[in-house]
Image (cartoon, rainbow, N blue to C red):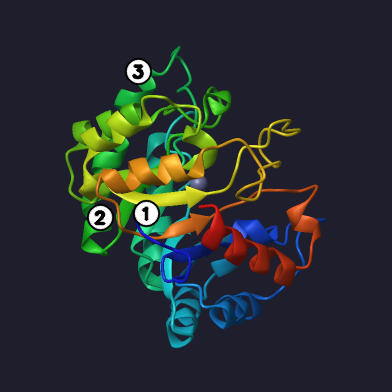
Amino acid sequence: MRNFSNDLSALALNTATLGHNLDGHGAKWPVERVIDACAERGLGGIVFWRREIGDRAAEIGDRVRAAGMRVEGLCRTPYLVGSQAPAAVVDAAQQAIDMAADLGAPVLTIVTGGTEPGTKGVIETQKILAERVATLAPYAANRGVSLALEPLNPMFGGNRTCLMTVRDAVAVCERVGAPNVGIAVDVYHVWWDTTLAESLCAAGPERILGYHLCDWLEDTSDMLLDRGMMGDGVADLRAIRTAVEAAGYRGPCEVEIFSAADWWRRDPNEVLDAIVERFRTVC
Ligand code: ZN
């Protein structure tokens, strides 16, 4: 297992951790200030959300690299199943791929969307998902972008996801069969899964495109917006990273904490200092 006690090169900030600057959330820091604050602390990279990038993708990507860091990824495609007409889905996803390419982000995350209208359960929806990802994969490959399917905690089934385990996400990857399609592993979504290690080993290193850090609070108060800082919850972070790395993963560890009532209310400097300290000591 990699030793992070004195090495922050694998540490990346997912900017959602600073509250997105949504109405009522976040400190309203401009992107440039976020980049500088991460660089000052020695982080290796940043993962952005589309809403922050707008038409400034190339400029922001260059700014990150000039600060000595990497753009590790972009969140995320619109939902690929569960709602819109297929042509609109593919078109919107291609725009997200273009943004990732312009930003210089090697990975674009996919949150799949929920059960397709007119169907029940997830099996039919997973087939439709695989078809749509197969349509997008060559387009993304041409632009140097990999697509990471992120399985979500089962409580997000229905309206947000049709992938609730790493095993199912890997099965969709195999159905697609494209070298630039893999998975993202997020502590919040997989911490409960006792089959995680074997599912990751079956996936193999080339399929694991991201690892997302946070914690599961014992008495969580909100499904979406009450994630914990690493070390504050009940997820076995060392065991999960051991499993991810035993499967061959050596990429970034991306801190992604949606926390409307706690961390989003704090000074981003305090949040970033806590991330660095926890990354060194408990991850
Ligand atoms: Zn995630």
Q: Which of these two is toward me, 91 or 77?
A: 77
Task: Tell me the amino acid under the disc marked 2.
Answer: Tyr
Residue plotted at (32% across, 28% down): 167
Query: Would you name the residue on which mark 1 appears?
Result: 94
Residue plotted at (55% across, 58% down): 281
Marks 3/1: CA–CA distance:
23 Å
Marks 2/1: CA–CA distance:
7 Å
Counting residues from the N terminus, which is met first, the one under dot 2 or under dot 1? 1
Residue plotted at (35% across, 18% down): 124
Give the number of the disc on residue 139: 2
Task: Tell me the amino acid under the disc marked 3.
Answer: Glu
Q: Which of these two is toward me, 255 or 151?
A: 255
**Mark 1 crowdedness (10 Å alpha carbons): few <14, some 14-19, many ≥20:** some
Label 3 sits on a secondary structure element that is: helix
Examine the image and state in which quarter residue 271 appears. bottom right
* Left or right of 80 on screen, residue 277: right
Query: Would you name the residue on which mark 3 appears?
Result: 124
CB of mark 3 within 8 Å of CB of mark 2? no
